[in-house]
Image (cartoon, rainbow, N blue to C red):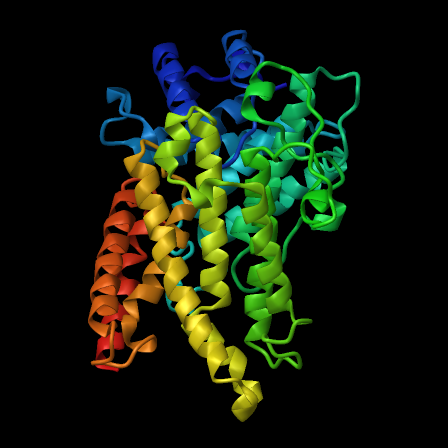
Amino acid sequence: MGLISDCVIYSLPPRPVLRSVIDTYFIHVHNQPYSYFQESSFRQRLESNLLPRCLVLAVLASAVKFSTHEYYAGRAREATEKYARESWMSVLTDYMAAEENMNIHVVQTVNLLAVVDYTGAVTAYLKIPTALANAPAAGRVSAGWLKIGLAARISQDLHLMKEPDAWLSYAEQEERRRSFWSAYLVDKLISCGKSRPLAILDEDCHLQLPCDEDTFQKGEWKKTQTLGELLSWNTQMVERPSPFALAILMASIFGRCTRYVHQRCRADEIPPWDTTSEFSAISSSLLLLESYSTLGSRPISEVIQNGEQGPQEIGYLVFAHTLFHLCHCLLNHPFLVRLGLKPFGSKTPTSFPVRALRASWDHAKQLLDLIHDAREAGCLVESSFYAYCIAVAGGIHSLGASLLVSPGSPGSETRTQDSAYYFQQTLDWLDRLGLFWVHAGNMVPPLRLMMVMSYLG
């Protein structure tokens, strides 16, 4: 039902244009950071007209914004909206209206459309002053959030959270795993706002994590860890987790971090400096990435030159380490630290807020350095979520060095200059990402306002 061959001709571009956009998809969208397909298998099924039209349209909607083909000159946004709308209507008519007709293609389609909707909204991830990405519950933001909830329920109905049937080919098994873990990633990233509860819980994920890209593309099988095993310090590791698995690990910790941040706005009986606090537990979990990955201790250019990872796997490493720095920025964010310490008044150790503020500034700096170095090394830094990460870091730098050192004290001038440099770098990055993502450009005015307010005291 709903194959390409059944599709009205005007719904899809001419075949050469279609192939060009598919090429664009696998360069700019695939593994950025979501992974749904084995590329060779997808292309074969596309040429044989064996893919449902809802999925092909969703892929087009995801990739057209990056296309340089003259066919879309001056109308890429219009084409994106058209493809997304027709894809969703196809899901409703071909699958939602039929009984027992769900399959993995529906999960892949709805996931892709959730990202298109969420990132196409002007207000996505926009409330940067509180660093909470507290987008309003209206328009396409809500449509995107509802779609990922639907994708999660369909995934659960298809038992994608469990190991695939052994009779499936290794490539099909891994594609099912990756489709589920991509739904997990979308859920964690889109649900980072306030009043956006998660649809997929860590304790419900019983399948192994994605294998490395080379094994997947060859159609081979490899035993990997589960998320629970990766989150445990007691797990004996035979080999390092795949870069995709590390991105999932960090998304899990990021989800825990955002829940803690929202809860910390309320009174908390356990102070963050207590070793039994959630703050301490999250900080400890963040150290897991350092034990699994060596990227943080070496320049990206060195990893690329050594040929240890392919370009797309390096992209996952960059994404995982960006989430690592983002978590530290949120845990130690100046506004949130101030809110969280209010209930403890004079009992607050003077050294704790000082260390927290310094940590937020250092990780905001490292986050922007990482993204800059990745781009200089030839990595594609184009995921929509990078805009949020960059804006949070820029928000910290917009406050300047005044929170860290007193004017005139040793190092104050250097800190102030560094903050100004990184704040400008933030604006440059958001302008660059704004070429593809509406919400990125709309983050600039609030950040400029924060900068003005910080100077006015």
Residue 218 drawn at (x, y percent) = 59, 14
Q: In which quarter of the image is residue 267?
A: bottom right
**Vertical placement of 354 versus 422: above or below?**
below
Q: Please indicate, yes or no, whether residue 20 appears anywhere in the rendered image.
A: yes
- Front residue of 282/67: it is 282
**Vertical placement of 357 versus 115: above or below?**
below
- Front residue of 142/321: it is 321
Which residue does the image show at 48% across and 61% down from the upper left?
A: 328
Quarter containing the N terminus: top right
Quarter containing the C terminus: bottom left
Q: Is residue 102 left or right of residue 353?
A: right
Which residue does the image show at 44% across and 48% down from the upper left?
A: 322
- Front residue of 417/104: it is 417
Which residue does the image show at 73% across and 38% down from the upper left?
A: 161
Q: Is residue 108 left or right of residue 412?
A: right
Residue 436 drawn at (x, y percent) = 32, 39
Residue 453 drawn at (x, y percent) = 26, 76
Q: Please indicate, yes or no, whether residue 28 appears anywhere in the rendered image.
A: no
Residue most extreme to the right = 166
Residue 233 drawn at (x, y percent) = 70, 50
Residue most extreme to the bottom = 346
**Vertical placement of 239 versus 331: above or below?**
above
Circle count: 0
Q: Is residue 6 left or right of residue 373?
A: right
- Front residue of 207/18: it is 207
Q: Quadrant of residue 107?
A: top right
